[in-house]
C-alpha cells in the first residue's frame, strides 16, 4: 500500500442528516450515494439500520455502487448483551453491507456517567462487537467517539480502547473530535502518538467544525500518518457541521500530493456533486465555498481581471476546471465551453469544440439558468436540451392544452377532502386525443391524464415511476408571485434514476415541464420510435 494513498469516507447520508433543516428521503440518499460513487469516494455511509424508517427503506433497496463501499453505521453491543445476541448489531449485519462502522466510547467520563459501567466492560463491548463484524466476513471500522477529549483526560484509557478495536480486527480505527473543540497542533501531536501503536494505514480521523478547524484538523491528522479521512459533502452535520470533503479532497490531491479514490478525471465532477446535494435539499449553494462556489473563481475589478487574463495563476490557486468549476469575469462571463463539451461526452454526444451549436447551447444554458433552471441537479433535462439543440429528439407527442381543477369540500361523511382533476388535449400517433383523470393532487392528476393517452401508444411507459418531487421558491421576495422551480426524480427499474426540471411562476406549469421531460427521456432512453405520422405542424 502506498503511503501517499488516503481513503475518503463520506458520512453525508447519516452524519449530514443531523443538520438542522435537512431531511433526506430514501430517493435522496440513493441519488447522493450514486454521485459519490461516480466521484470515486471510497466509503459511503448509508445510515443507521434499525434507527428510523428512512434508513431501513434505503438499506432494503440500496443503490448499486461500482466503486464505493457502502457502509452501515451503528453502536457497539449493549452492556448485558452478548455480541451474538444484540439487536442493534443484528440490524447492522442484516443490512448486508461490505463494511460496518461501529461507534464506541473512549472517554472514561462517558463510560462512568453516560454508560454507568466499568471501564473493562466498555473495552469488552468494543472487542466483542468488532470481532462479531469481522467474524461475519465484513470490514469493521471503529469510530472512537470523543477520542481527543478522552485522551486529554485519561490518555492510557483512550489508547487502550483504540488498541482493543485494532486487536479485535478493525480495518480502521477512526479518532473522532466529536465536539470539534481540538485544534490542529494537538490533533497532529496526538495522532502521531497513536500511530506508534496503530499503523497509519489503519488509522482514520473524523472532525467536527465547532471551532472552524475541521478541515485543518483533518489535514493535520493526515500529516501525522492517518490514512482515512471522514467528513461530509459541503460540510453538512449537526451544530457547525463536519469536515468538508468538498474542500479536503482537492486539497489532498492538488496541494499535498496524496492519492485518493477520486481520480484527476473524476475530480472534475466535484462542483457538480456539491451542487446536486444542494438541489436535493432545496438549498442555495454557498457562493463563497472554496473550490466549488460560484464566487470561488470570480474576478471583479480591472486590475484583477487584467492580471487573470494575462496569467490565471495571479489570483487562482488552482485551475477551476480541475474541480469542475469555471472562471467568472464579472461583466463579461467567458467560461463554460469546456464544461458543456465535458457534459456532451458524459451523455455520449461527440461534438467538435468549434461547432457553432456549442456556443448557441452555452448561451441557452446561461439564459435558462438565469431564469432559474438548475441543470447540475437535472441531468436528464440537460441531455434533452443538448439533443434538441442538435435536432436529435423525436417529437413523441405534442400537448395542445391542459386544465387542472382542485376542489376542497366536505364530503357526505362530513370529512374535509381535496379532489384534483386534470384534462389534457394532445396530439400523438397522428391524431388528437383528450383524456380526463383524477389524482392525489394536481401533479398526479396531470400525470394520470397523460398516461391514459400515452400508454396505449407507448407501452414502455408502464413502468415509469415518479420517485421524488421537490419545489423551491427562487425569489421569495415576490411572495405568491415568485418564480418556482420543480425537480422530479423518475425511475423505471431498468437503469439509474433520472432527474428533470421545470421553472415557471405557476407551480403546475413548472411541474408539467419537468414531467414532460421525464416522459420524453424515458422514451428516448428506451429507443422508442415515434408512433404514427408526426404531430400536426411538426
Image (cartoon, helix red, strand yellow):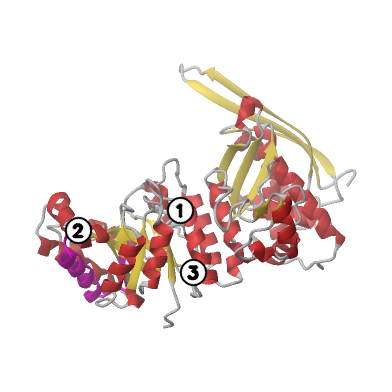
The answer to which of marks 1 and 3 sits earlier in the sequence is 1
Look at the picture and state if 76 lies above or below 54.
below
- Front-lying residue, 209 or 284: 209
Q: Is residue 94 left or right of residue 445?
A: left
**Distance from label 2 to label 3 (Cα)?**
30 Å
Picture coordinates of residue 221, whole percent (x, y):
36, 68
Name the disc covering residue 314, or none: none
Q: Which residue is mark 3?
A: 252
Mark 2 is surrounded, within 10 Å at the Cα level, by few (under 14), some (14 to 19) or many (20 or more) other residues, namely many
Instruction: State the image quarter where residue 303 is shown.
Output: bottom right
Sequence-first disc among 2 and 1:
2
Tell me which segment is drawn in magenta: 153-174
Residue 77 seen in render:
no
Q: Position of residue 366 (x, y in %)?
A: 74, 49
Magenta includes 450?
A: no
| Residue at 44 percent of width and 40 percent of height | 21
Dot 2 or dot 3: first in sequence order is 2
Residue 161 inside the magenta-drawn segment: yes
Residue 422, compared with residue 301, is above or below; it is above
Viewed as shown, does residue 115 lie left or right of 308?
left
Neighbour tally class for label 3: few under 14, some 14-19, many 20 plus, Cα within 10 Å: some
Q: Residue at x 55, y 65 (%)?
A: 39
Which residue is identified by label 2?
107
Q: Secondary structure at mark 3?
A: helix
As drawn, which residue projects farthest toward the right?
Answer: 537
Q: Position of residue 429 (x, y in %)?
A: 81, 48
Amino acid at each position: 500500500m502506498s503511503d501517499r494513498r488516503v481513503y475518503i469516507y463520506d458520512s453525508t447520508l447519516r452524519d449530514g442528516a443531523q443538520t438542522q433543516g435537512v431531511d433526506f428521503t430514501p430517493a435522496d440518499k440513493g441519488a447522493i450515494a450514486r454521485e459519490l460513487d461516480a466521484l470515486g469516494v471510497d466509503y459511503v455511509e448509508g445510515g443507521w439500520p434499525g434507527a428510523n424508517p428512512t434508513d431501513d427503506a434505503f438499506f432494503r433497496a440500496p443503490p448499486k455502487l461500482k466503486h464505493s463501499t457502502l457502509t452501515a453505521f451503528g453502536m457497539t453491543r449493549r452492556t448485558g448483551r452478548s455480541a451474538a445476541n444484540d439487536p442493534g448489531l443484528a440490524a447492522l449485519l442484516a443490512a448486508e453491507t461490505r463494511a460496518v462502522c461501529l461507534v464506541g466510547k473512549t472517554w472514561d467520563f462517558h463510560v462512568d456517567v453516560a454508560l454507568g459501567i466499568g471501564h473493562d466492560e466498555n473495552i469488552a463491548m468494543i472487542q466483542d462487537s468488532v470481532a462479531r463484524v469481522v467474524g461475519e466476513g465484513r470490514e469493521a471500522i471503529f469510530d472512537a467517539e470523543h477520542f481527543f477529549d478522552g485522551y486529554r483526560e485519561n490518555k492510557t484509557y483512550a489508547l487502550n480502547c483504540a488498541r482493543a478495536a485494532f486487536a479485535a480486527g478493525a480495518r480502521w480505527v477512526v479518532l473522532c473530535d466529536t465536539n470539534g473543540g481540538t485544534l490542529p497542533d494537538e490533533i497532529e501531536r496526538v495522532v502521531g502518538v497513536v500511530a506508534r501503536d496503530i499503523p497509519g494505514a489503519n488509522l482514520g480521523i473524523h472532525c467536527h467544525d465547532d471551532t472552524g478547524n475541521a478541515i485543518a484538523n483533518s489535514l493535520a491528522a493526515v500529516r501525522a500518518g492517518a490514512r482515512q479521512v471522514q467528513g461530509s459533502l459541503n460540510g453538512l452535520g449537526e451544530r457547525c457541521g463536519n469536515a468538508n470533503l468538498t474542500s479536503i479532497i482537492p486539497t489532498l490531491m492538488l496541494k499535498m500530493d496524496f492519492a485518493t479514490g477520486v481520480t484527476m478525471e473524476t475530480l472534475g465532477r466535484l462542483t457538480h456533486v456539491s451542487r446536486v446535494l444542494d438541489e436535493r435539499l432545496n438549498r442555495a449553494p454557498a457562493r463563497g465555498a472554496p473550490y466549488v462556489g460560484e464566487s470561488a473563481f470570480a474576478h471583479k475589478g480591472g486590475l484583477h481581471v487584467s492580471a487573470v487574463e494575462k496569467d490565471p495563476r495571479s489570483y487562482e490557486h488552482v485551475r477551476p476546471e480541475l474541480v469542475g468549476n469555471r472562471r467568472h469575469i464579472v461583466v463579461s462571463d467567458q467560461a463554460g465551453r469546456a464544461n458543456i463539451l465535458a457534459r456532451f461526452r458524459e451523455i455520449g454526444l461527440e461534438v467538435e469544440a468549434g461547432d457553432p451549436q456549442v456556443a448557441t447551447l452555452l448561451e441557452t444554458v446561461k439564459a435558462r439558468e438565469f431564469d432559474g433552471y438548475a441543470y447540475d441537479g437535472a441531468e436528464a433535462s440537460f441531455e434533452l436540451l443538448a439533443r434538441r439543440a442538435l435536432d436529435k429528439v423525436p417529437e413523441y407527442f405534442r400537448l395542445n392544452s391542459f386544465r387542472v381543477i382542485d376542489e376542497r369540500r366536505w364530503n357526505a361523511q362530513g370529512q374535509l377532502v381535496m379532489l384534483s382533476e386534470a384534462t389534457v388535449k394532445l396530439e400523438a400517433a397522428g391524431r388528437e386525443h383528450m383524456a380526463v383523470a383524477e389524482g392525489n393532487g394536481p401533479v398526479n392528476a396531470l400525470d394520470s391524464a397523460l398516461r391514459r393517452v400515452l400508454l396505449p401508444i407507448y407501452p414502455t411507459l408502464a413502468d415509469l415511476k415518479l420517485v421524488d418531487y421537490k419545489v423551491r421558491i427562487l425569489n421569495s421576495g415576490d411572495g405568491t408571485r415568485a418564480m418556482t422551480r420543480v425537480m422530479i426524480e423518475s425511475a423505471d427499474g431498468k437503469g439509474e434514476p433520472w432527474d428533470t426540471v421545470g421553472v415557471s411562476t405557476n407551480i403546475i406549469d413548472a411541474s408539467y415541464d419537468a414531467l414532460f421531460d421525464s416522459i420524453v427521456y424515458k422514451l428516448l432512453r428506451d429507443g422508442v420510435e415515434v408512433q404514427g405520422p408526426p404531430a400536426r405542424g411538426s
